[in-house]
Image (cartoon, grey):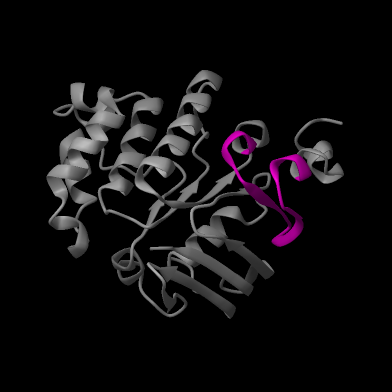
Amino acid sequence: MASSLTVANVDAGYGAVRVLEDVSLQVGAGETVALLGTNGNGKSTLMKSIMGIVQPVAGSIRASIDDVEHELIGRSTEEIVDLGIAFVPEGRRLFPKLTVTENLLLGAFRPKARSAIQRNLDFCFETFPRLKERARQLAGSMSGGEQQMLALARALMSAPRILLIDEPSVGLAPLLVKRTIDKIKELKEGYDLTVLMAEQNFTQAIRIADRGYVIVHGRIAFTGDSAEALSNNELIREFYLGA
């Protein structure tokens, strides 16, 4: 069954500081959509708004989960996760003094995920063999690339239908960035996910994105209906390709 996400005319911010202005975007069922923008333009605020961490002051955020529509604004983060939406935050936000396995199990608290814990755990260890090798290692003692693998795997333990990923390339060496982006594609296909990925590394993001949006100063400045359209846009060339 299909799952999709629609953000319509959203305004959001922090107290008196408005960060997002009239933001609208769509992520269709089974799509990988890139939200592109340099630091400070509102990517993380939009992700947090979708997850209920930041409450928008205007607009609508609707998720269709297995063909059932849900308005997300006004719901708690826990309720949104329970619907089947998982979030990999910027900086990974792991529990550093817990082991790899313990971090993964904490990702499976969603009621619908509990009956599939072992199956999802096996899938994560198959997808990320390094995590299986380090199952008893403390998360805080792992490398940045390994921690990013763990953050992705922890999100998958909730058996999501929609996956939000905020800046997966931050703090990683170029080779690890490529591997991480490749893994996101692999997980999306293997789990039949709908993915919204916020990223400032245009070159890597566009390799797996079906299409994307460029956000500038809290507004959607360009909508690219394909990877080719994004590559040929002058805004992209100016800010990402140095043209």
* 192 displayed left or right of 170: left
Front in this rendered view, residue 55 or 224? 224
Residue at (28% x, 44% y) in the render: 154
Front in this rendered view, residue 26 or 23? 26
**Res. 205 image quadrant:** top right
Front in this rendered view, residue 213 or 172? 213
Residue farthest to the front, as pictured? 1
Q: Is residue 224 magenta?
A: yes
Residue at (66% x, 68% y) in the render: 24
* 230 displayed left or right of 30: right
The reply to whether residue 134 is visible in this rendering is no
Q: Position of residue 110 (x, y in %)?
A: 22, 61
**Res. 186 image quadrant:** top left
* 191 displayed left or right of 106: right
Q: Position of residue 2 (x, y in %)?
A: 43, 63
- Total number of numbered discs in the rendering: 0
Residue at (61% x, 33% y) in the render: 207
Q: Is residue 104 magenta?
A: no
Q: Position of residue 239 (x, y in %)?
A: 78, 39
Residue at (47% x, 25% y) in the render: 179
**Res. 130 image quadrant:** top left
Q: Which residues are magenta?
A: 206-229
